[in-house]
Amino acid sequence: MSNITIISGSPSEETRLNGVFQEVLNYFHGIGSTSEIINVRELPPEALIQAKFDCKEILEANKKVENSNIIVILTPVYKASFSGVLKTYLDLLPQNSLEDKTILPIAVGGTFGHLLMIDYALKPVLTTLGATHILKGVYVLDNQVKKISDNRYELDSEAKNRITTSLNSLNFNNPSLSTVGVDITI
C-alpha cells in the first residue's frame, strides 16, 4: 500500500480549502488508506520565514514527504498563484525530495481566470524539487464550495466528482503508474 501525505497550503484556518481537504481525507479513509497531514499554517512561522532547515517541526514534516510516494498538495489561489505560506514550506524541502513521487495538485480559486495557475506557477516549483509524476490538477471554484457552519464546508457534486476522478487515477500499488498529465481538469 502507498504512503500518502496531504499538504494543505492555506494560511487561514477558516477556508473553503477545508472542504476540499475533508473530501480528500474522506476518500482515503473510504478506501482504507491513512495519510499523513501537513498543515503548513501550523508549522512554526519563524522557521518558515527565516528558512530554519533544522527546525524540529520542519524536519518532521519533511520526513513525512520523504516517506510518502503519493503527495496531494492543496492550495488556495492568491494573486494568480499558489499561497505564499505553501511556497515558504516548499522552499524548505530538500532538493529532489519529490523525485519518484506521484503528486496531485488541487487548487481553489475565485475565477476561471486563474485556472492555469497549477501549470504555470505550481508545477515549475514542483518540478524543481524533482517531481516527474505530476497528475492532472483539479481546479475548484470558490462557489463550488458552500460554507455550512463552524468551518465546515460542502462541495457541489460536480467538484466532488472531479476530485474523486483524479484520486481514482492514483495507482496505490505503484504510484509511478498513475495517470500523468499536464492538463488541468475543470
Image: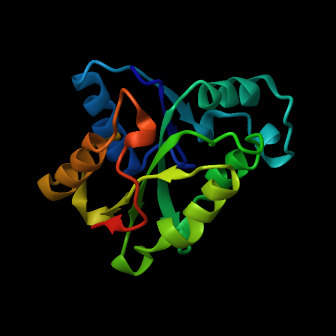
Residue 185 in the image, given as x and y percentages of width and height: 30, 64
Residue 141 sits above or below residue 67 on the image: below
| Residue 157 at x, y percent in the picture | 12, 53
Q: Looking at the rendering, in which quadrant would you find the N terminus?
A: top left
- Taking the spot 36% from the left edge, 26% from the top edge, the residue there is 173
> Which residue is more in the foreground, 171 or 58?
171
Q: Which of 85 and 66 is in front in this view?
A: 66
Q: In which quarter of the image is residue 186?
A: bottom left
| Figure quadrant of residue 122 | bottom right
Q: Which of 142 and 131 is in front in this view?
A: 131
Tell me the colour scheme of the image.
rainbow
Q: Which residue is drawn at 54% across and 39% down?
A: 101
In the image, 3: left or right of 144? right
Quick check: 116 left or right of 96?
left
Q: Image check: 116 left or right of 124?
A: left
Q: Nearer the viewer, residue 2 or 163?
A: 2
* Residue 38 coordinates in the image, percent (x, y): 56, 33
For the question of whether residue 150 can be seen, the reply is no
Q: In this view, does 61 lie to the left or right of 30?
A: right
State whether residue 111 appears in this view: yes
Q: Position of residue 61 (x, y in %)?
A: 66, 29
